[in-house]
Image: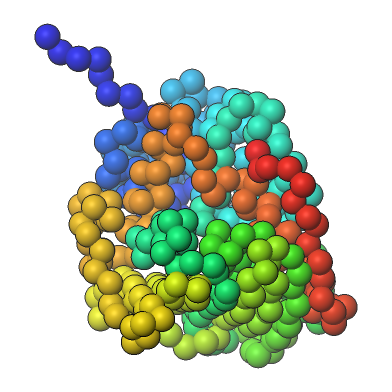
């Protein structure tokens, strides 16, 4: 006698570019609870190539057709920034669960609107904050939650990505209609949103921030424009943060700080211990984790058990696949098992809120207070 077939989640992916190939699609393909039903791209050959590579049954060129497919229960929006919000809202309106790459929207109001729309429709959401799913980061979160680190005093979040140090490396996804002679928030949006979310996850809600944006490479190639462009984008942001808990934070994002990808470092200092996670791929190792205590102040390396990693991965697995396999595993289980949600559109909206506050702080040269959180997150 055979048991009931295992539950599987019907997945439709919109966007067949490099990040879908490196991270999203391998994550679904590797997890037996995910069923890759469909993929959509405006370039049919690109979509077909991904379908052939990952065994996807259906190929679409119109996102509306994929969203309407009754076999698709969850929609993955892996497309350029300006399309994240409308595609996510369309999926929500169709009653589909949805995961979107970040940022969800350019404005905090739009991001909160999407979070509330999903709540009203009774569907689940997730933002692609990849680094929450680093095994090292998740271990630090466990140490915070179980009291191992004690009261949290300081959280430092750093992110370096040096590819845009080269002015011939094309800058991508510049918001339409922006004046090139005025500061365009960029590293704080593209990379800072990840970092701000990680730090909030560890330290709790932001209370106040003050920040500085700076342009270091005044002329560069910009995707969609001919020749070198004089454009004032935010190549680097530094910020200080005060949290509702009383903890303090230091934040830095950069397009031009030399070092390997993904270049994330999280340092958490508490009354009982301190931990440092470096998500920097070096010598074939995706990340490292160190821990110290008041009576043993020299940081020692922590080796995590095999169970900390998605099946079939190790520290030698390229980081996009390692982290996204973990993200996909948690996301699919949340839906199928009706488990508590994590890293939702609400969290994305809160991250966007802090990004905007740091930009305002830079423009007005002052501390900016964040709205108090009066109700629990949806």
User: Relative to 251, is 18 above or below?
Assistant: above
- For the question of whether residue 223 can be seen, the reply is no
Q: Position of residue 328 (x, y in %)?
A: 39, 45
User: Relative to 175, is 296 above or below?
Assistant: below
User: Relative to 244, is 346 above or below?
Assistant: above
Split into 4 quadrants, where in the image is the C terminus?
top right
In the image, what residue occupies the spot 24% across and 75% down? 284
Residue 62 vs residue 254, the one in the foreground? 254
In the image, what residue occupies the spot 38% across and 78% down? 293
Horizontal side of residue 179 vs 213, given as left or right: right
- For the question of whether residue 9 can be seen, the reply is yes
Q: Position of residue 369 (x, y in %)?
A: 81, 66
In the image, what residue occupies the spot 62% across and 40% down? 88
Residue 61 vs residue 283, the one in the foreground? 283
Horizontal side of residue 1 vs 5, given as left or right: left
Q: How is the image coloured?
A: rainbow
Q: Position of residue 90 (x, y in %)?
A: 65, 34
Residue 120: which quarter of the image? top right
Horizontal side of residue 180 vs 22, given as left or right: right
In the image, what residue occupies the spot 73% across and 43% down? 375
């Amino acid at each position: 006698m055979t048991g009931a077939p295992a539950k599987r989640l019907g997945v439709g992916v919109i966007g067949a570019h490099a990040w879908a190939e490196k991270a999203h699609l391998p994550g679904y393909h590797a997890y037996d609870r995910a069923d890759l039903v469909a993929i959509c791209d405006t370039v049919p050959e690109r979509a077909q190539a991904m379908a052939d590579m990952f065994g996807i049954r259906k190929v679409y060129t119109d996102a509306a057709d994929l969203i309407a497919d009754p076999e698709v229960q969850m929609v993955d929006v892996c497309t350029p920034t300006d399309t994240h919000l409308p595609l996510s809202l369309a999926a929500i309106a169709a009653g589909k669960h949805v995961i979107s790459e970040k940022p969800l929207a350019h404005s905090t109001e739009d991001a909160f609107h999407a979070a509330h729309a999903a709540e009203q429709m009774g569907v689940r959401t997730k933002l692609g904050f990849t680094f929450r799913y680093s095994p090292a980061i998740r271990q630090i979160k466990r140490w915070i939650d179980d009291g191992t680190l004690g009261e949290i005093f300081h959280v430092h979040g750093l992110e370096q990505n040096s590819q845009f140090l080269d002015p011939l490396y094309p800058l991508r996804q510049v918001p339409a209609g922006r004046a090139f002679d005025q500061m365009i928030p960029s590293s704080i949006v593209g990379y800072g949103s990840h970092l701000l979310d990680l730090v909030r996850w560890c330290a709790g809600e932001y209370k106040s921030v003050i920040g500085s944006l700076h342009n270091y490479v005044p002329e560069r190639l910009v995707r969609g424009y001919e020749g070198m462009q004089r454009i004032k984008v935010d190549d680097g942001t530094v910020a200080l943060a005060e949290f509702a808990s009383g903890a303090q934070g230091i934040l830095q994002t950069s397009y031009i700080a030399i070092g390997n990808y993904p270049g994330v470092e999280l340092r958490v200092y508490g009354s009982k211990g301190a931990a440092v996670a470096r998500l920097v791929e070096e010598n074939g190792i995706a990340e490292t984790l160190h821990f110290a205590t008041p009576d043993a102040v020299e940081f020692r390396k922590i080796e995590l058990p095999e169970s900390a990693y998605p099946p079939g991965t190790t520290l030698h697995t390229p980081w996009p696949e390692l982290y996204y396999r973990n993200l996909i595993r948690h996301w699919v289980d949340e839906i199928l098992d009706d488990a508590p949600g994590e890293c939702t559109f609400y969290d994305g909206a809160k991250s966007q809120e802090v990004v905007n506050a740091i930009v305002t702080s830079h423009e007005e040269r002052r501390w900016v207070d964040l709205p108090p959180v009066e109700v629990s997150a949806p």
